[in-house]
Amino acid sequence: MSSSLESSADIEVDLQKINNRYIALWSEFAGKGELVTGRYPVQYPPKMSRGALLFVGCNPSFRSPQATRSKIQTGLDKDMTEEDFYAWDGELNQQKTFQEAEKRCQLSLSKDEILRDRYFKVLSEVTEASGLPRWEHIDLFAVRETSQKEVIKLLKIQGAGNDEDPSEVFNMSEFAKVQLDIALDAFTLLEPSTIVVISAIASKVLRSYVKQKKLNLEFRKDCGTYMLALGGRRIPLFLSGMLARQHALDVFSRERLGWHIGYAQTFSERGT
């Protein structure tokens, strides 16, 4: 690992503009009566690491609508259900926004202490196997929903949820396209050493949209994965499935993935 990459991982990137764009998008579509979700969008910590290994999920999960969040957790003066806590009311409650950002900061900055969720623990394990010093995580879409198939339905993405569909270009709503544009801009800001998409649906959608945008995406046989040209850089891009929970890769496939990420990164550093 080169010292330049190690130092780049310590440089923080301000993602507040990304957060603000999601809020503006939600407000715009709510104003037109076309907002397809009643929950506010994902909000990332204002500072994230540049040059880290970037894992990309499909969307932020929403697991227990009726679960109670105590007022200590909400930062408000009362207990709330998860549904009420994440409810979009046209203007984000700043306290709620702060609490969510704080949680994501913990995931980003204190992973060894708070990785109790298997989903995130596996990301740490794969990163360690790759030899890369640090990882970050964002989502392709900002819609909070339990089921990825429900996200596909809400965003009117045709065919991506059908494993038998050989199509490589999917139609989708304008609301979905703008979210993908925001995600690509987040990629550019973060300048990741490698991108690993950890959702089969998200992998299909991202590859499709990158082709629609006519970005340079090439499968390189010499390094065994895609290379994506973004922001004047070539980034190794792995399109994969879930690493934890239902339908996840087995432990041996994750071991191979870790090795392959490290190999592709070294290949990219050589610039060949």
Image: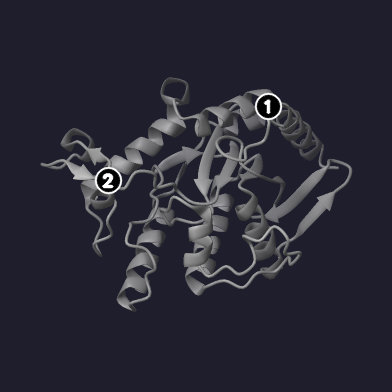
Q: Give the percent coordinates (x, y) of residue 246.
A: 57, 39
- Residue 33 vertical position relative to residue 6 in the rendered view, above or below: below
The residue labelled by disc 1 is: 251
Colour scheme: one colour
Residue 60 shown left or right of residue 33 in the figure: right
Mark number, residue 66: 2
Asked which secondary structure carries label 2, the reply is: loop
In this view of the protein, which residue sits in the foreground, 183 or 257? 257
Residue at point 41% right, 61% down? 21
Q: Residue at x 62, y 73 (%)?
A: 171
Amino acid at circle 2: Gln
Image location (x, y in percent) of residue 72: 18, 33
Residue 45, disc: none
> What residue is shown at x 35% (from left), y 36% (from top)?
103
Quadrant of the snapshot with the N terminus: top right
Q: Based on the displayed image, in which of its 4 quarters is residue 30 positioned?
A: bottom left
